[in-house]
Amino acid sequence: MIRLENVTKSYSTEVVALRDASFDIAKGEFVFLVGPSGSGKSTMLRLLNREERPERGAVWVAGRNIIDMPPSRVPHLRRNIGNIFQDYKLLSNKTVFENVAFAQEVIGKPKHVIRQQVPAVLDLVGLAGKEDRFPHQLSGGEQQRVSVARAFVNRPLILIADEPTGNLDPTTGEGIMRLLDRINKTGTTVVMATHDQRIVNTMRKRVIQLDRGVIVRDQARGVYE
Amino acid sequence: MFSRLTYTLRETFAGFKRNVTLTAAAIITSAVSLLIFGLTLLIQHGFDNLLQRWEGGVEMIVFVSAGTQQDGLDFIASTLQDQVNTGTVASFEYCDVACSLADADRVLAGDPTTRQLLDETNIPTLFKIVPAESTEVEFLRGLKESYQQLPSVNSVTLAEEQLDLIGKLQGFVSTYTTGLWIALMFASGLLIWNTIRTAMFARRREIEVMKLVGATDWFIRVPFMLEGLIQGLLGGVAAVGSMLFINWRWTQGVQDFPDSSGMTALVVIDGYQWTVAIIILAFGALVGMIGSGIAASRFLDV
């Protein structure tokens, strides 16, 4: 599903975010990217979204090298990738329903499909009955659930999560992880950058560890070291 | 398709509500610049009316007395033909009753009272003359005096003084109004661009999310372009209303000018003002849309 081949990305001559990084992620895998701040986790996620382009190497997503992809095709790539952020990135002037529906609206899904699929996904993330609330009326965990619902509503092939539990207390974080695990079991590939040692150690999924832009460990059913 | 249209319209009007002050400023600036643009076109058209008589290098007009019989006309024509043969006159053309009435329609457009007094029975016909030496003022004046001696000639008008005055006025007015409307149009485009840029800056988070969930650049850009287009169009509507009002007041007021001032031809009542109105609306919409499109593109690099 995802393949990085000798990818190098730098932001200046002094700052090398990724150095000669290579790995394969199969369809339906759940992968943690771990490492200290500045180790290149977020850069790696941004490369998968084509928010960034590397200087060298190739990034394959769903069988296509996205480095050479023309800009007009990038939106189509992103429709196959769901994004979850540490700060949720919800739109404060839209209700829970509208925030989730927004992801379908911008890709031109018809109204009747939106009316059918949004309540279903809100039910999946445990927010049924809160459709009309605004983000500021929700707890942090609930806001992250809206963010998960928005990322998953278009049934993407890949879900990218950048520190999704970073702003949440441990119990709420565990709830979000159960949700991501459930989504993963539907066949969606999940790639998650995290600092949360407890979550990584509990889930025992594949762990790719980065240090100053270099992959130093790639371990199946790994732990946070 | 329908859901996209609904989305686009909803976002466009949300944009209007978000930036009321800036939107109003952009509309007013476009209105003022488009008004000056429209007035420039009307003024130029008015001058064209004034200069209509002197087209084709005509330097002199010999007005024939009303009621002159054919033999009187033949005499003037044969005198002019002799001058063509001797090289004094390059060419001449007779403007009959129908031609004179058409001229009167243009020249007296701003003075309908006087125009109504003229009909086929009393309108003076005329000869338009192109002298061989049109740059020699003394020669032209001598020629004018010789024509005034001819029987059946009512009066002779020399283009020199009128053309000089009209030309100077036209040059002055056209240069400054054109310069002014270009500057104002640029300012108006910048203001619309800035309005949209501010709107997009306020919504950069929303745009980032849109990009990440797979919205195309055009999907994001279109509501902003539509907002700019409507701003330009509203400015255009205000400009058209003001221009038509000013044109109406000028047309009314010009009737009080003396006939000899030549100002009676400096009006636009032949429908040209509606052509200008369409140009203003199209131009306003285009400037608004392009300005917004450029502003929007700057925020789409996610």
Image (cartoon, coloured by chain):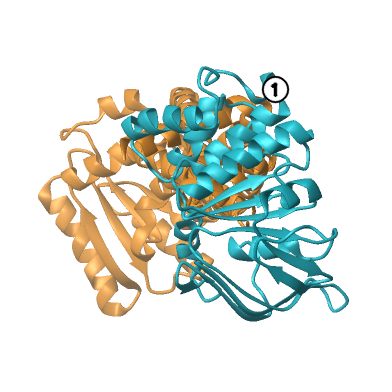
Chain colours: A cyan, B orange
Q: Nearer the viewer, residue A58 or B49?
A: A58
Quarter of the image with the C terminus of chain B in it: bottom right
- The residue at 71%/32% (across/down) is A172
Graded by Cα atoms within 10 Å as few (under 14), some (14 to 19) or many (20 or more), the crowding at tag 1 reads few
- The residue at 50%/58% (across/down) is A28
**Residue B54: x %, y % from top left:** 38, 56
**Residue B32: x %, y % from top left:** 60, 35
**Residue B144: x %, y % from top left:** 41, 58
Disc 1 element: helix
Left/right placement of residue B153 relative to residue A152 reads left
Classify B163 as above or below A130. Answer: below
- Count of numbered circles on the image: 1
Determine the image quadrant of residue A216.
Answer: bottom right
Q: What amino acid is at disc 1?
A: His
Left/right placement of residue A110 relative to residue A90 reads left
Q: Nearer the viewer, residue A85 or B5?
A: A85
Task: State which chain disc 1 sits on.
Answer: A
Quarter of the image with the N terminus of chain B in it: top left
Q: Which residue is mark 1?
A: A136
Residue sitting farthest toward the right:
A14
- The residue at 68%/26% (across/down) is B21
